[in-house]
């Protein structure tokens, strides 16, 4: 059975690959400012050595009606939280590069947050074959020692055939 990758990972792959392709070969310490398994897997697949440090921010407190602005604002806020947090001084001394970002799914003109429950997850997945979802993702790379940032936003639209119930069940379980 061929199943398309979940749309949440598509923009992250594009954004992180774009940044990784522009990085020099003698990288400073890289810190992934995310708890996302997908982002860890992408960096690992690209051969990038990195540490993980999840920023402590309230993402729901940061809102913007424009999706691209929202994901960039969240990526920047995560970098700021890490650099101003308890490990910030050490990251600056080490000259670490901090990679943060965010992604949002837009389906049928609506921004979709993480589903609150199983019913909402099923509703989201069910809508994907009727209304192709777009994943808008950002990647923000911050030089901790200088504060300089490089950022990118990618949008990927995924077109699904009708999704079989057994596939929906498997996705909801994940």
Image (tube, rainbow, N blue to C red):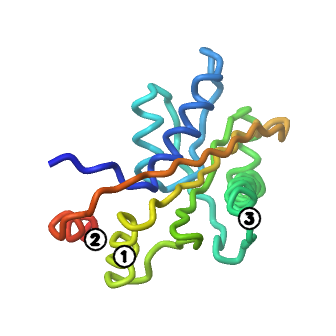
Q: CA distance from mark 3 to mark 2?
A: 28 Å
Q: Is residue 55 left or right of residue 50?
A: right
Dot 3, how many residues are within 10 Å of its Cα: few (below 14), some (14-19), or many (20+)?
Answer: few
Q: CA distance from mark 1 to mark 3?
A: 23 Å
Mark closest to the chain's N terminus, 1 or 2: 1
Q: Residue at position x 58%, y 28% from top?
A: 20
Above or below 134: residue 93: above
- Percent x, y of residue 171: 27, 65
Q: Circle 1 — which element?
A: helix
Above or below 114: residue 21: above
- Contact (CB < 8 A) between labels 1 and 2? yes
Q: Residue at position x 68%, y 62% from top?
A: 67
Q: Circle 3 — which element?
A: loop
Q: Circle 2 — which element?
A: helix
Dot 1, how many residues are within 10 Å of its Cα: few (below 14), some (14-19), or many (20+)?
Answer: some
- Occupied quadrant, residue 78: bottom right
Q: Nearer the viewer, residue 57 or 160?
A: 160
Mark closest to the chain's N terminus, 3 or 2: 3
- Percent x, y of residue 87: 68, 51
- Contact (CB < 8 A) between labels 3 and 2? no
Dot 2, how many residues are within 10 Å of its Cα: few (below 14), some (14-19), or many (20+)?
Answer: some
Q: Residue at position x 20%, y 63% from top?
A: 167
Residue highlighted by disc 3: 66
Disc number at residue 172? 2
Above or below 167: residue 127: below
Mark closest to the chain's N terminus, 1 or 3: 3
Above or below 28: residue 87: below
Q: Is residue 169 left or right of residue 106?
A: left
- Contact (CB < 8 A) between labels 1 and 3? no
Residue highlighted by disc 1: 121
């Amino acid at each position: 059975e061929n199943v398309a990758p979940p749309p949440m990972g598509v923009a992250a792959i594009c954004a992180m690959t774009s940044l990784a392709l522009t990085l020099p070969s003698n990288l400073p310490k890289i810190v992934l400012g995310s708890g996302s398994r997908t982002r860890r897997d992408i960096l690992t697949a690209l051969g990038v050595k990195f540490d993980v440090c999840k920023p402590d921010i309230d993402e729901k407190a940061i809102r913007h009606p424009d999706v691209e602005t929202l994901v960039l604002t969240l990526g920047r806020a995560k970098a700021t939280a890490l650099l101003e947090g308890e490990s910030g001084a050490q990251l600056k001394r080490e000259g670490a590069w901090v990679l943060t970002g965010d992604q949002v799914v837009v389906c049928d003109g609506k921004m979709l947050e993480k589903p609150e429950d199983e019913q909402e997850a099923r509703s989201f997945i069910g809508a994907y074959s009727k209304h192709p979802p777009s994943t808008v993702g950002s990647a923000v790379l911050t030089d901790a020692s200088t504060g300089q940032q490089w950022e990118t936003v990618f949008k990927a639209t995924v077109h699904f055939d009708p999704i079989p119930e057994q596939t929906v069940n498997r996705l909801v379980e994940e």
